Image: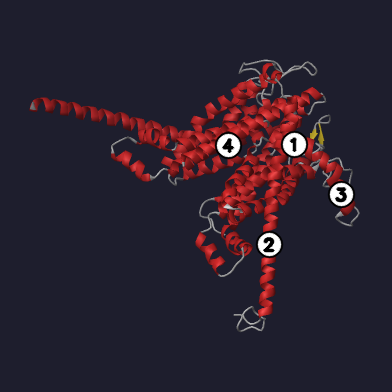
Amino acid sequence: MSATTAIPGPAKDSTTALLLGRRRHRVNLIIKICCVTATVIGLLFLASILFTLLWRGVAGLSLTVFTTSTLPPGSHGGLLNAIIGTVIQTMLGAAIGTPIGLMVGTYLAEYAQGSQLGNAVRFVSDILLSAPSILVGLFVYQIIVSPFGGFSGIAGCLALALIVIPIIVRTTEDMLRLIPSTLREAVIGLGAPKWKMIVLICYRAAKDGIVTGILLAIARVSGETAPLLFTSLGNLNWSLSLTRPMASLPVTIYQYAGSAFQDWVDLAWAGALLITVAVLAVNIIARTLLRGGK
Amino acid sequence: MGRGSQVSGAAKAETTASTRWTSSLGDTIFAALARLSGILVLVILGAIIVALAIGGAQALRTFGPGFLTSDDWDPVRESFGALVPIFGTIMTAILALLLAVPLAFGIAFYLTELAPAWLRRPVGTAIELLAAVPSIIYGMWGFFVIVPIMSQYVQPAIIDTFGDLPVIGPFFSGPPFGTGILTAALVLAVMVIPFIAATMRDVFDTVPAVYKESAYGVGCTTWEVMRSIVIPYTRASVVGGIMLGLGRALGETMAVTFVIGNTNRIATSLFGPGNTIASIVALEFPESQTGSLKLSALLALGLILFVIAFIVLAISRFLLRPGVKA
């Protein structure tokens, strides 16, 4: 084409070719520098968050944080009830959500096979995975808290379970799909029923991936605040009852960070440091596990 | 001897039959359980919509379609409208995307084409960890770190530079409080960058190497390969990834609540305070009585947020499903 037009093409004119080439490489260099800058900015955000947490969190950290419950400002309270509350609600939420998510993931990977219902379930589960978590809180408020008269720890667990389910569904389905079909055929060929094939062989082969999913789900919900505001509400007194309002670390941080008392703000930073370190540690463990499994 | 083996053979046949019967029963039960769990997911989605609609019915009945167009939020006169939160939600989410998409694209480009192999995993993991940080932490970080920087350096500088210009000047005017729409958008941008970057990186990796090698072979630069081969090949998925980020930004609650200023007014300036659906629900909920019109208005807002998020996420899923080509 350039042979027939009068435009001085690189083939005809060596000076133009040189200039064009130089310009192309200059553009390339500028874009590359921009991309490196973007990555550095992204990493700087993470560094800034971690540095702020360490700097302000370590100042508020002391043994009383782990040994004392939340107390009125000025009386050297801790975060014990909030930490315990978060552990209870996260664990129960994961315990309720994981079996359901596992079964849904199994259904999608092993039974649905392109059926209308399977596609609908996968679509809805993916929507729920990214849906605003505050809506889960409002939903549980409407169906549990409001009709059964009051905020409760169990409502918080249910809200977290609803967030856990789609996470487990996604990882379980993905991991089960990675298992070669020859393995399944070998098991069926030995005369094993399908459910035994799934439970004894597929789950075992996909174990690392499924455990990773559970860990990631636990990491995700342990930092959730919005759904707990409407369900377990938070409790500044010591309470382990699942039928009464229950404290949690994120909600306590939220209440304390906005307060006017310096010792509460310090405690909020200490709590923020704790929850972030825990969440990031679980994330890294989960990733290492998955990588080791491969 | 022969008789004995016959007996044991019959017994074996009997056991096999009973095993087969139990295993087919086991299969039926297991399949039914799996199917029921799948249906449960659909039921949950339906129940969320129904519960929010029932809860919001009182407000929607009282105010009618005017609920969507009224900028009122007056608990004393019991007059509520959704316009300001809807505006704030969409405005902050779109501004956040404007900030996040170029950065996320740069990160994804760096991770797939530019970074040396030994750096890809640690940098990729670090960016993904940004997504794991709980949103309340972003709120505190935004409030104690970003807000002071915005009020002392960024906003005065922007006001000095653009504030007096005609037409666009008013968008960059007003007192530099540090909080407001722009700050909320900035924090949201940091939160959605990892989601968009991770999606883009994954779809960039799906481009067959032979396409890229052909382009490099005829002398294309890295950027030309990206622009002419990778982006056209992955266009639909890239848009899907951006929509996924938008869906995340729309419903973010805690981080926004800390930094947006929480005022029920449509901000004419980017520095003006505002609110979003999620932030007004989180803030006003503790002050509303069960069965009150205000609570119903908040639930109706939740329903609106759900509808918006559902549409955005559905488009995202549609574009990201395997096998979609631009």
Q: Residues within 10 Å of mark 3 (few under 14, many from 20)?
A: some
Marks 3 & 2, CB-CB < 8 Å contact: no
Q: Give the Cα distance between marks 2 and 4.
A: 34 Å
Q: Please, what is the three-letter code of the amino acid marked with disc 2?
A: Leu
Per the model, the C-alpha gap separating discs 3 and 2 is 30 Å
Q: Position of residue A214 (x, y in %)?
A: 53, 33
For the residues tagged 2 and 1, is the chain the same?
A: no
Same chain shared by disc 3 and disc 2: no
Residue farthest to the left? Answer: B2
Marks 2 and 4 close (CB-CB < 8 Å): no
Q: Amino acid at mark 1?
A: Trp
Q: Position of residue B57 (x, y in %)?
A: 68, 34
Q: What residue is shown at x 88% (from left), y 53% (from top)?
A: B161
Number of on-image labels: 4
Residue B92 falls in which quadrant of the image? top right
What chain does mark 1 sit on? B
What type is the residue that disc 4 sits on?
A: Ile
Other-residue count near label 4 (Cα within 10 Å), few / some / many at <14 / 14–19 / ≥20:
some
Q: Which residue is mark 1?
A: B141
Q: Is residue A172 left or right of residue B14?
A: right
Distance between the alpha carbons at the discs numbered 3 and 4: 40 Å
Horizontal and vertical percent position of residue A110: 42, 40
Looking at the rendered image, the disc whose residue lies closer to the viewer, 2 or 1, is 2
Provide residue B82's location: percent of width, then percent of height.
Answer: 76, 40
* Residue A29: numbered disc: 2
| Snapshot quadrant of residue A48 | top right
